[in-house]
Image (tube, rainbow, N blue to C red):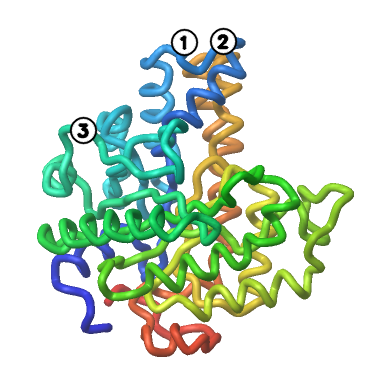
């Protein structure tokens, strides 16, 4: 067991991981993204989506899918009733940030939820606190210095509360389309340098939640690939290794809104690369098609979809985590980039 974890942080991490110490968690803390999905399905503007639709959807997903997950990530704005409906064996992470960012302010600066603190998240039942940060090496030094200080403050607050701090890094390029080929060419560097920066001890990050270091629609052989290829498969595998070698804390992958099939391909590349990832916090790749089922068939339609397709999606991801490493794997080995599977199977 790595000595860097306090008793409180070990307790929180155990609560959100499975019997191997792997984090096989479901993410449904989306707010603006979920409004957009509902708006598309309902044929209305995102702001016109009834609040109750989002609350009910999160409740159904929590009840239906957490028996197949080690934990669920929710938000205090729409998800507190859903948290109460989760499986008794599933831990709880709560998001601390406001959704999206103010487009009038340069740099996609983070904002915390009003009237919430880490201690209040814990009082609401959270085993761990999560902060999303848009981060790019293409931003100015001033913008990134402000972000560094922001994360340090949240890390200190989590340390004071003795609760694990999950930092979600969403990479982007200033002035670039997030899903475009221009950004795809620099994404490996942005992801790698973000991992290296926030592995530093002053941030007190316990687990990094990161996107894979390639844009999957531009990877050779990807189910979501188009005509333009930016990375050969062998190059993508190399880039996975290079990014992982910079991690000095446990890290997990997020699905970045791709399909279930495409996210499975992403995890296949991670396994091929032999990287020491500690699991996933998988969101839309698991449940996004359930929105249309809910709009079309109501709660019964959603429950039918969850019991069939939703469970199949999450079990697909669970099977792809065979090569994942426990969060308590030796950090010195992790930072040295040594691959290979841990022999430890139980909780620490």
Q: Are marks 2 and 3 in contact (CB under 8 Å)?
A: no
Within 10 Å of the Cα at label 1, are there few (<14), some (14-19), or many (20+) other Cα atoms? few
Tell me the quarter of the image containing the N terminus.
bottom left
> Does 35 sit above or below residue 24?
above
Q: Residue at x 42, y 53 (%)?
A: 25
Secondary-structure class at tag 1 = helix
Residue position for label 3: 114
Toward the viewer: 327 or 69?
327
Tell me the quarter of the image containing the C terminus.
bottom left
Residue position for label 1: 48
Residue 204: x, y in percent? Answer: 25, 68
> Does 240 sit above or below residue 341?
above
> Does 30 sit above or below residue 265?
above
Point out which mark residue 44 bears: 2
Of mark 1 and mark 3, the one earlier in the sequence is: 1
- Name the quadrant containing residue 178: top right
Secondary-structure class at tag 3 = loop
Horizontal side of residue 57 vs 152, given as left or right: right
Marks 1/2: CA–CA distance: 6 Å
Residue 211: x, y in percent? Answer: 54, 57
Residue 186: x, y in percent? Answer: 66, 61
């Amino acid at each position: 067991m790595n000595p860097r974890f306090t008793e409180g942080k070990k307790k929180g991490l155990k609560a959100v991981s499975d019997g191997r110490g792997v984090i096989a968690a479901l993410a449904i803390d989306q707010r603006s993204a979920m409004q957009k999905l509902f708006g598309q399905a309902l044929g209305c503007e995102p702001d016109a989506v009834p609040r109750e639709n989002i609350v009910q959807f999160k409740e159904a997903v929590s009840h239906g899918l957490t028996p197949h997950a080690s934990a669920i990530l929710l938000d205090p704005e729409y998800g507190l009733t859903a948290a109460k409906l989760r499986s008794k064996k599933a831990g709880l992470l709560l998001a601390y940030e406001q959704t999206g960012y103010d487009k009038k302010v340069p740099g996609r600066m983070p904002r915390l939820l009003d009237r919430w603190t880490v201690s209040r998240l814990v009082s609401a039942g959270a085993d761990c606190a999560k902060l999303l940060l848009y981060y790019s090496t293409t931003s100015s030094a001033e913008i990134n210095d402000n972000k560094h200080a922001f994360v340090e403050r949240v890390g200190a607050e989590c340390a004071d509360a003795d609760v694990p701090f999950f930092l979600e890094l969403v990479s982007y390029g200033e002035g670039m389309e997030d899903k475009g080929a221009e950004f795809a060419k620099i994404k490996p560097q942005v992801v790698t340098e973000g991992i290296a920066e926030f592995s530093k001890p002053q941030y007190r990050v316990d687990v990094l939640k990161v996107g894979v270091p390639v844009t999957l629609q531009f990877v050779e052989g990807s189910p979501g690939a188009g005509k333009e290829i930016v990375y050969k498969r062998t190059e993508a595998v190399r880039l996975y290794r290079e990014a992982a070698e910079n991690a000095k804390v446990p890290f997990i992958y997020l699905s970045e809104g791709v399909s279930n099939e495409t996210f499975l391909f992403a995890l296949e590349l991670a396994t091929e690369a032999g990287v020491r990832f500690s699991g996933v916090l998988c969101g839309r790749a698991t449940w996004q098609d359930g929105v249309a089922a809910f709009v079309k068939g109501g709660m019964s339609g959603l429950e039918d979809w969850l019991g069939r397709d939703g469970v199949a999606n999450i079990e697909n991801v669970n099977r792809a985590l065979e090569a994942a490493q426990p969060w308590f794997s030796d950090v010195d080995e992790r930072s040295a980039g040594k691959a290979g599977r841990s022999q430890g199977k139980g909780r620490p």
